[in-house]
Image (cartoon, grey):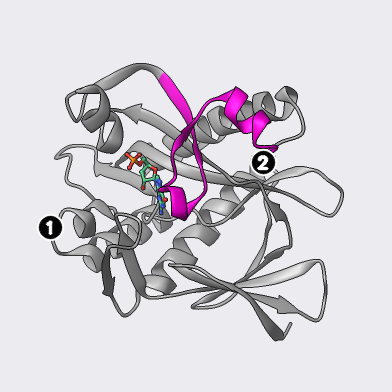
Amino acid sequence: MKKTELLYEGKAKKIWKTDDPNLLISEFKDSLTAFNGEKKDEQAGKGALNNKISTILFEYLESKGVPTHFVKMIDDNNMLHKAAEVIKIEVIVRNIAAGSLSRNLGLKEGKKLPFTLVEFDYKNDELGDPKLNDQHALILGLVKEQAELDYIRYMARKINRFLSEFYAQAGLKLVDFKLEFGRDANDNIILIDELSPDNFRLWDKDTNEKMDKDRFRQGLGGLLEAYEEVLKRIQNKG
Ligand code: 5GP
């Protein structure tokens, strides 16, 4: 499968068209951004780690019956996947308080939530990804009807259960994460984007050491080493 035309360049990936209109290639970049692009860096090897981690997690979720855009990993930095129309909602799933939830509501970082929280952010860099409720999403026409929002929430909770269990076997706590969904050629809602420590908070189960992009956001250093450790653990889990 050959790249034909650059469709889109984002902060962490380039998306390429291929000679098959139903298939695209994501090229994982080594660049890192945070705070809506205000903080930037480049870490050689980060793109390949995210591609490999995403591949393992997509294959695992597919094996559990979750419909995703994943087709196959092509090489270190490239993944072949189905084309999908992006639903402009960032689906945030939280098990433990951290990040903006702690900042906005004053919940102590590390507090286990009494139930899994699913939130929606509007995927819109110009507006800084504001919080959305269901009515906002419907008014903006981001989905066709309430039932689609209900389905997305249902899938996000299911994916959380699968991934939390998977990471637990690798000695990692799944604190929170962001998912994106899209519509495939048959109008089915499928999981898209990437599944990597760029959009997951992962803590070591014993020490709570941060093994994700917070190492960059908070200037802790050791980002590549942490991503390599995540890859090693999910490859050798159990
Ligand atoms: P928070 O709202 O606490 O900043 O983020 C919650 C979770 O969603 C974190 O795991 C974070 O990595 C992920 N997340 C939220 N918004 C974005 C985003 O715009 N880009 C990426 N890569 N991850 C995000």
Task: Measuring from the top left, give residue 37's x and y in whole percent.
Answer: 34, 62
Question: Between marks 1 and 2, how big is the CA–CA gap?
Answer: 34 Å
Count of numbered labels shown in the rendering: 2
The reply to whether the residue tagged 1 has its Cβ within 8 angstroms of ligand 1 is no
Residue at 58% x, 53% y is 58
How many other residues sit within 10 Å of disc 2, few (<14), some (14-19) or many (≥20)? Answer: some
Q: Which residue is mark 1?
A: 220
Q: Is residue 206 visible?
A: yes
Q: Which residue is mark 2?
A: 66
Task: Measuring from the top left, give residue 99's x and y in whole percent.
Answer: 26, 38
Which amino acid type is shown beneath numbered disc 2? Val
Q: Which residues are magenta?
A: 116-142
Residue 168's tag is none
Residue at 59% x, 24% y is 134
- In depth, the one of 24 and 124 nearer the eye is 124
Foreground mark, 1 or 2, reads 1
- In depth, the one of 165 and 127 nearer the eye is 127
